[in-house]
Every structure is written in C-alpha cells, then in structure tokens.
C-alpha cells in the first residue's frame, strides 16, 4: 500500500520530464517578458515577432510534452491546446496587419482556450503526478485574463505588447512554482522510500 502523499510508481519518472519542462517554460516566459518590456517597446517589428513567437512556442511545447507522455491520443487536452495555439499563431499574423486591437482580441480568445485546456491537463495529471494545483490555477487565471483581453480589445485606447506581458509573467510564475513543487515532492518521496 502506497503511503499518503507519495506518488504512484511511474509518476517519478514522468516528473523527471515535467520538472525540466516546467523550468524551460518558465525561463522562456521570463525572457519573453523582458524582451517585450525593453526591445519590444522600441522596435515594432520585434514586438510583432514576439507576439507571433509566444503562441507558436506554446504549440510546440504542448506537442513535445504530449509526445513525451504517451502520445497525442493519450493526451488529448494537450493536442487540442497545441492546435489552438497553432491557429492562434496564424490568427495573430493576420491580426497584425489589421490593428493591435485585433491582436489583443486574438490573444483573448486563445488565452481562454489554452487556459481551459491547461486546467483540464492539470486536473488529469493531478491523479498521476500530483503537485498540479499551480497548473490548474494558472489555467483558470488564463481563461479570466482572456476575457479581460477581449474587453480591452474593444476599448478606445490602442493596446501594445505591454498589455500581454503581465499574462506571460504570471505564466512564468506558475510554471516555476510547479517545477519547484514537483522537485520538493519527489525529494520527499525518495526520503520516505529510503526511510522505509
């Protein structure tokens, strides 16, 4: 019988992938936020590139994660998330030729979908990997942020890349928390096994 709060066999191996995956996603978002707040404000072309790269990276990351954990068939929420992010990348490219209001509207719809899929992935993984509360919270907050983006997109003031940077910063925070939490959880599990 498994002791309380100890992950099931196999979860530790899966966490060995999730920990660097979450750390890499946090690092990407931190770099993206820094670039958006510095170079992105001064260079419109770079800002446009950053706006394209963000959902594209999310699509790639979800595909890789799904494939490393049993494939797309077993990870349908990640497959859907990757699809939504891929479509969002194309939609952002089109919206950039229209206005930043349109871009923010696209980010809003994408943030809602990506958030709901991330929330569903976190709930599913909670049973096998544990320590997914930050991912669930992040998904819920992403959906709320998306609704706020859509509201901002209908406003009179022209938005900039700075409007999206806080969203990316919160994403970085939640991925970092998840990575650290899994690291601590696995260390405790190893200690418990050694003690028994």
Image (spheres, rainbow, N blue to C red):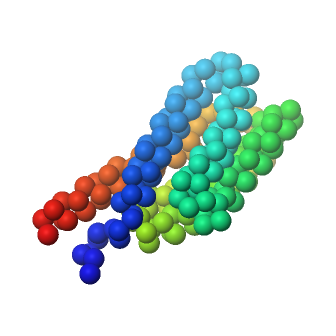
**Residue, x 12% and y 65% (percent of image)?**
195
Q: Position of residue 182 (x, y in %)?
A: 35, 55
Q: Is residue 138 left or right of residue 160?
A: left
Depth order, front residue of 49/141: 49
Answer whether residue 142 is visible to the viewer in this image.
Answer: no
Q: Is residue 74 left or right of residue 194?
A: right
Q: Is the residue 140 above or below the residue 163 in the image?
A: below
Q: Position of residue 140 (x, y in %)?
A: 56, 61
Outermost left residue: 195
**Residue, x 43% and y 58% (percent of image)?**
14
Q: Is the residue 120 above or below the residue 142 in the image?
A: below
Q: Position of residue 42 (x, y in %)?
A: 65, 18
**Residue, x 43% and y 69% (percent of image)?**
128
Q: Position of residue 179 (x, y in %)?
A: 39, 49
- The part of the image, by quadrant, that contains residue 164 is top right
Q: Is residue 179 left or right of residue 112?
A: left
- The part of the image, by quadrant, that contains residue 143 is bottom right
């Amino acid at each position: 019988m498994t002791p309380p709060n100890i992950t099931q066999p196999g979860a530790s191996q899966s966490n060995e992938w999730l920990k660097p995956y979450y750390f890499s996603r946090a690092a990407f978002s931190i770099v993206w936020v820094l670039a958006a707040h510095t170079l992105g404000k001064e260079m419109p072309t770079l800002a446009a590139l950053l706006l394209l790269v963000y959902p594209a990276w999310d699509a790639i990351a979800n595909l890789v994660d799904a494939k490393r954990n049993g494939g797309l068939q077993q990870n349908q929420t990640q497959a859907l998330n990757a699809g939504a992010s891929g479509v969002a990348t194309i939609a952002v490219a089109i919206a950039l030729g229209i206005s930043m209001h349109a871009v923010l509207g696209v980010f809003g719809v994408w943030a809602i979908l990506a958030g709901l899929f991330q929330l569903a992935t976190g709930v599913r993984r909670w049973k096998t990997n544990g320590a997914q509360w930050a991912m669930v919270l992040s998904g819920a907050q992403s959906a709320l942020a998306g609704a706020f983006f859509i509201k901002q997109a209908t406003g009179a003031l022209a938005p900039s890349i700075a409007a999206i940077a806080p969203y990316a910063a919160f994403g970085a925070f939640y991925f970092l928390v998840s990575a650290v939490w899994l690291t601590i959880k696995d260390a405790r599990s190893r200690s418990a096994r050694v003690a028994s």
